[in-house]
Amino acid sequence: MDENARQNDESEKCKMKKQFDERNHAKPSNIEIGNYVLRKTDRKENKLTPAYEPNPYNVMNKKGSMITATNGEKVVTRNSSKFKKVNRPPIHNDDEIEEQFENIIPSNIQDQPPSSGTEQQSTIPQQSERPVRQKHVPKYLEDYVR
């Protein structure tokens, strides 16, 4: 008798959960272990305060809807609704940025000394800082001498 009551209770709870999730358009979290996420700020001081912290966190553990993430300095455990998935890993310092650009720009171009004026160089037109409007004297003032 006791086992029958437990089974009925469990089936009813599952049915209620399913109806609640349907009614509230609940969807499962797509955040997995190893993903990078942004953490929602706890308090917004004013309307210019960003909604998410700028430094991404790395997901270490996931248990149900609870996510544990770290950004190297601190470890936080929050509900999955407090995180937003980011598709790219963080760039921490300028050395990593320089390494990425070194891979893009061939080393023979980087190491070339500036060429002398005797060689023919491709001319790149230099643009002024801002375009300047041509000013004309109005027609009715053309007769006057300045």
Image (tube, grey):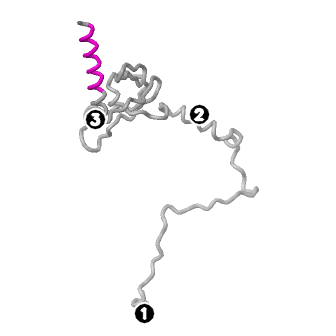
Q: CA distance from mark 2 to mark 3?
A: 50 Å
Reading the chain from its start, which is encountered first: label 3 or label 1?
3
Left/right of residue 18 with respect to residue 72 in the rendered view: left
Q: Quadrant of the N terminus?
A: top left
Q: Quadrant of the C terminus?
A: bottom left
Asked if the residue under mark 3 is in contact with the one under mark 2, i.e. CB atoms within 8 Å, the reply is: no
Q: In this picture, which residue range is highlighted in magenta?
A: 3-17
Q: Quadrant of residue 111?
A: top right
Q: Circle 3 sits on which residue?
A: 23
* Figure check: 38 above or below 119: above
Q: Is residue 8 magenta?
A: yes
Q: Earlier in the sequence, mark 2 or mark 3?
A: 3
Of badges 2 and 3, nearer the viewer stands 3
The kind of residue tagged 2 is Glu
Q: Position of residue 70 (x, y in %)?
A: 40, 23
Q: Which label belongs to residue 143?
A: 1
Res 46 → quadrant: top left
Q: Main secondary structure of the magenta part?
A: helix
Circle 1/circle 2 CB separation < 8 Å: no
Residue 143 lies, with reference to residue 23, above or below; the image says below
Secondary structure of residue under mark 3: helix
The verdict on residue 91 being magenta is: no
Between marks 1 and 2, how big is the CA–CA gap? 66 Å
The residue that label 2 is drawn on is: 99
Question: Is residue 91 in sight in this rendering?
Answer: no
Q: Which residue is more in the foreground, 105 or 145?
A: 105
User: In the image, is residue 8 above or below residue 127?
Assistant: above
